[in-house]
Image (spheres, coloured by chain):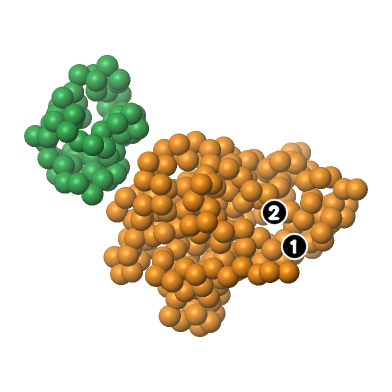
Amino acid sequence: MTEQEFIEKMQEDVLDTDVEISLEMALADVEEWDSLSFVSFIAMAKELGFTNVNREVVNEAKTVKDLFELMK
Amino acid sequence: MGSVLYNFSGERFVVTGASSGMGRKVAEELAASGAMVLAIARRKERLQELKHEYPKHIITATIDVCDTKGMAEVISSFVASYGKINGAVHAAGIFSSTPLRNYDESEARKIMDISFWSGIRFIQLVNKKKNAMDGCSSILFSSVAATIGEKSNFAYSSAKLAIQGAVRSIAKEIYTRGNRINTVSPGWVNTELTRKEDESSLVNKKFYDWHLLGIGEPEDVTGMVLFLLSERARWITGTNIVVDGGYLLGGV
């Protein structure tokens, strides 16, 4: 998945937001990053075959880029 | 006796199963109330009739609701042309007997696909922020069959009950923007779908008598649908509204 594809999936499927997201953004600053988007992210990762993405590793992510790194 | 007239001028709605029965009636009533309606169904000729009746208020899309990609495209196109959606109604569905001893599995799965799975995808699409106004109201058609478990209809009853369960869960996900979702459970309503079932003679004739107020007409149900779509229902979400002429009381 390219960076652009990841950003699009984050905006539309995970965060469901009109706000533009960038890899540098801190998750704490993303208003839509909440418990629902948290589980949506894990569901998306599983759907794409990243079965190692679980609550523990997502909890450690601080930025959008950290989430992107989990999808490699 | 008083009457209720809705004004949906300047609002936009998407209705599936809009070529006949209650879906069509919902589309007609919304159009007559001033709304722009994206009417979705498979039968092009029927949709064209609807468009002919309300040329300024009905936009048609001939598509199978199970076509997820196609549904995303037609909804996106409607939103781009007319603006974000205020509400959505999933009325698409099929009815077919599935006796346990000899049911057609592909037909049973089709019932679930059209009523339930395509309904979930539809609700997912219309509730996306890019497609929906805040406060968007979604309605899916369930049925009294979900409660009473009609004989030889396990697939239909299950699909309609599954919708109710999903709605209770989804309501908890979409409320943050004021979005709402509910199901409506009609009793036996005089539509093309039920007439076909009548002809198959599998319906227990007592069934009709249990409708204390007689068999319904589409407009007996669509009033509730329009109410749930309206701002007057802004405090109602995650629930099922039965509109059945007294059927679930089980007879006198």
The spot of residue B89 in percent (x, y) is 51, 57
Q: Residue at x 41, y 65 (%)?
A: B12
Residue A35 visible somewhere in the drawing: yes
The chain under label 2 reads B
Q: Nearer the viewer, residue B232 or B119?
A: B232
Look at the picture and state if B90 lies above or below A14: below
User: Which residue is identified by label 1?
Assistant: B216
Q: Is residue A52 left or right of residue B177?
A: left
**Chain B visual colour:** orange
Tell me the CA gap for discs 1 and 2.
9 Å
Mark 2 or mark 1, which is nearer the start of the sequence? 1
Determine whether label 1 and label 2 are within 8 Å by CB: yes
The chain under label 1 reads B
Look at the picture and state if B180 lies above or below B19: above
Mark 2, Cα crowd under 10 Å, few <14 / some 14-19 / many 20+, is many
Q: Is residue B15 left or right of residue B160?
A: left
User: Which residue is identified by label 2?
Assistant: B243
Look at the picture and state if B54 lies above or below B233: below
Name, please, the residue furthest toward the front.
B2
The amino acid type found where label 2 is placed reads Val
Q: Residue at x 58, y 48 (%)?
A: B183
**Chain A visual colour:** green
Q: Residue at x 36, y 56 (%)?
A: B133
